Image (cartoon, coloured by chain):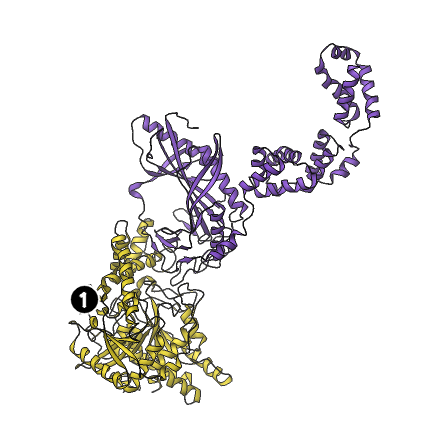
Chain colours: A yellow, B purple
Amino acid sequence: MPHRLTIAAAARALHSGQLSAVELTRACLERIAALNPTLNALITVTAETALAEADAADRRRRQDEVPPLTGIPLVLKDLFCTQGVRTTCGSRILRDFVPPYDATVTRRLKAAGAVLLGKANMDEFAMGSSNETSHFGPCRNPWDTERTPGGSSGGSAAAVAADLCCGALGTDTGGSIRQPAALTATTGLKPTYGRISRFGMIAFASSLDQAGSLTKDVTDAALLLQALAGHDPLDATSIDTPAPDYGPALDRGAGGLTIGLPDEYFGDGLADPVRAALTAAQQTLEREGAVFKRISLPHTGAAIPTYYIIAPAEASSNLARFDGVKFGHRCANPRDLRDLYCHSRAEGFGAEVQRRIMLGTYVLSAGYYDAYYRKAQKVRRLIADDFRAAFREVDVILTPTTPETAFRLGERTGDPVRMYLSDIFTINVNLAGLPGLSLPCGFDAGGLPIGLQLIGPTLGEEVLLQTGAAFQRATDWHARKPDLPGPAGR
Amino acid sequence: MSSHPGYEVVIGLEVHAQMRTRSKVFCGCSTTFGAEANTQICPICAAFPGVLPVLNHAAVDMAIRTGLAIGGTINQRSEFSRKNYFYPDLPAGYQITQYELPIVSRGCIHIDTPSGPKAIGVTRIHMEVDAGKNLHEGIAGASWVDLNRTGVPLMEIVSEPDLRSSAEAGEYLKKLRAIVRYLEVCDGNMEEGSFRCDANVSVRPRGQAGFGIRCELKNLNSIRNVMRAIDYEADRHIDLAAAGQPVVQETRLWDADQEITRSMRGKEDAHDYRYFPEPDLPPLVLDQARIDALAATLPELPDARRARFQEQMSLSPYDAGVLTAARELADYFEQVVAVAGNPKSAANWVTGELLGQLNKAGLEITAAPVSAAALGRLVGLIEQGAISGKIAKEVFTILWTKGGDPERIVAEKGLTQVSDSGAIEAEVNRVLAANPEEVAQYRGGKVKLLGFFVGQVMKATGGKANPGLLNKLLKEKLQG
């Protein structure tokens, strides 16, 4: 069952010669063939090129020292541009778009030797919390296929949870890695804003978007981060501080850490099983030597309205390039230029994307800019200040990732605001640009996964990995597998 | 020329100057003008999904140098913004520009007016990207988009509404163009569109403090068209006022063929550009050391050079102004002076003969067929008394058409001035003897006849007689 291997375990097996990259890739492709029709986790499967890459990886491995991810089959969320492989962003408007360039993330994974299995399903333009806004249909949660895997990186999370691959990359603008990780019992890392290049990553909200990983454990998160972190001259917002060696942090243990528990995240909206799982997680970490401290992040309540001004504002501008002129969907027989724009965009974008474009256009309009966008930027600074103050007292902050476990597909599609509330615990982290890590920490009575969130200070990836690895050594929630049919299933 | 005495014209100019960087402002594509359509583009300037801009600091340096050259404040923190609108030549659907925080604030440009020098305020200079071009030729019903120009860096230089006539607007543009050319930050070519001007024009009754309703004029592709459009527009506003009709605030296009302005779009059709700070670019933070280093690279600018020419070379303000209007011309002139010695006669030759011939031939100074060294030696020959001014013009014509060396031309053609008083005296004696009647008239008081005698001697000597010596000898003989 090589597809069940973590990245680290697969790398060891490849290195020792117990397993070839072709065998590993073939196992994943068979798993995809068996389960993807049900899960709809992948929009595009690159079986042929994956096997060719795996074969090349095996030959390289016989000859030289090879980079750490050589022969490891991974999945990319379908908004990372892949040269020659279509990149849809989950949208009709890019249904047939084949980029002539690689995203920096894609390039770095290739340089590290990874094998690309395919492109993961996602909410259209990463706008959604359930993967239901995808033009290619919703992805399903491997733990209960009637439920959402979360979003927007739902396909990446489901692919990892169902062992279709060793690991996956997603993006997180308001919780789009951490929320699906929580809902699928996977490990989701959103690094500090700017830690990983955004070049070639199709933009939703430029000041919030951050690439990260969905993996089977924290060790794998560190391995992928190591391959991807670092300054990129093609991204002026990427951080110029060299990435540290993340490995040592994994072994440091939780002893001596002060962990903050923000009052605002443990209020009335929290489902009982989630509250119970968080309490148990706190006790686990205390046994590992961490000290807990109640803290306050007073502007937490402003997160959702602030986010739903800034993110749509940036999106309304970022998505203007999809106009039917140069690439992507173009309507048939436009009468004139205006008609070409209106119909290409109306046909190409789904309802949620259109809703956010309108919202963003409105808040940037003359006469409304000061009342909305400028004020939201001020509140954003207050939210960041809350965290800065808190990190003077604690090393890391522990919260639930989501208020509830996975909801049923269709349950919230008619109520956008309720859908937006799925991200209530994750959005602040993006507004403050901080790193966050979601870890599996239990299951509810129905067997649905529960996630906890660790929040670190700017460039505090190491303390997140340190705390997360300690927690996973003391628990086995991350090692549990959903009951799925298919070849070599349980 | 609008000159209704009861009204005053108020003009502000917005100049878009293409910066002469080798590559575009946010990607590595070439900025060369005139390449085949869409051969100088990449995923970044074509705004493909996921691409990001990275700032070309050569453009930043050029904007800083321009700001310093007009005495502006260089803002150590400026920011880029997005100006959002849909148009096929704008592939991202937004233009990256500077809005709330430009790189330069509050500069000043000095111009000459009939009533003396005047300082015109510059509100700001900001950086932005150029758009592509829509082409409507070839297949009927289709339009083509050429993105070669997309992403070429521009400076927008915005004046205060300090200009009060089309002539002042023309002087302002000439001076600004001279400055950017001296700095080598823009080639200043209005026809090719690398130096473009929009004019905001209004009129008000003389003595009124507030401004009238303004119109923005576009499609002004030469300084002459800027001036003519302003005059037309000012007259239009004055006529409206005289008829008791209001001016409508709008954007108007200049039609150079019919010499009128036409409404393009009204205020109600004005775009809401939804400006907001560009999230893909961090704020532009400049340290003082960088600004100081760039200040040290500034060349001597037109105003300073003109003042030096007046003071050190005793040139007239007019000549000094003409000679410093372009850096290349001023450089040429200084090379002529270095060889010739006498700045005044060098100035006369450069502004007179040389510029006259260049204008006639439609050539720039850089394409002058006569080198500065050759002209300098020619002027030197006059200074030494080796040839007369008249002969020098002949030699100049030979230099212009065939090239060569002034001394050799003079020697080969036997044009050396006759300064031997004996030889000239013999010729004078011969001419006086041959024209007794005129000699008598001269002695009877008709002294204007001196020119006749000079002409006769010159004719006989093939123009080579030294004019000073000839005059002296003739006067002596005639009085005697």
Camera-nearest residue between B283 and A420: B283
Which quarter of the picture shows residue A427?
bottom left
Which quadrant of the figure contains the C terminus of chain B?
top right
Q: Is residue A288 left or right of residue B460?
A: left
Q: Is residue A443 left or right of residue B451?
A: left
Residue A276 sits above or below residue B322 on the image: below
Which quarter of the picture shows residue A429?
bottom left
Which quarter of the picture shows residue A152?
bottom left
In the image, what residue occupies the spot 39% across and 64% down?
A237
Residue B443, given in percent of the width and then of the height, sits at: 75, 11
Q: Which residue is mark 1?
A: A418
Residue A350 at least partly seen: no
| Chain where mark 1 sits | A
Tag 1, which secondary structure?
helix
Q: How many marks?
A: 1
Which quadrant of the figure contains the N terminus of chain B?
top left
Q: Amino acid at mark 1?
A: Arg
Q: Is residue B390 left or right of residue B214?
A: right
Camera-nearest residue between B354 and A261: A261
Residue A383, given in percent of the width and then of the height, sits at: 27, 65
Residue B11, given in percent of the width and then of the height, sits at: 40, 36
Residue A401, given in percent of the width and then of the height, sits at: 24, 74
Circle 1 packing at 10 Å, graded few (<14), some (14-19), many (20+), is few
Camera-nearest residue between B22 and B449: B449
Residue B454 at least partly seen: yes
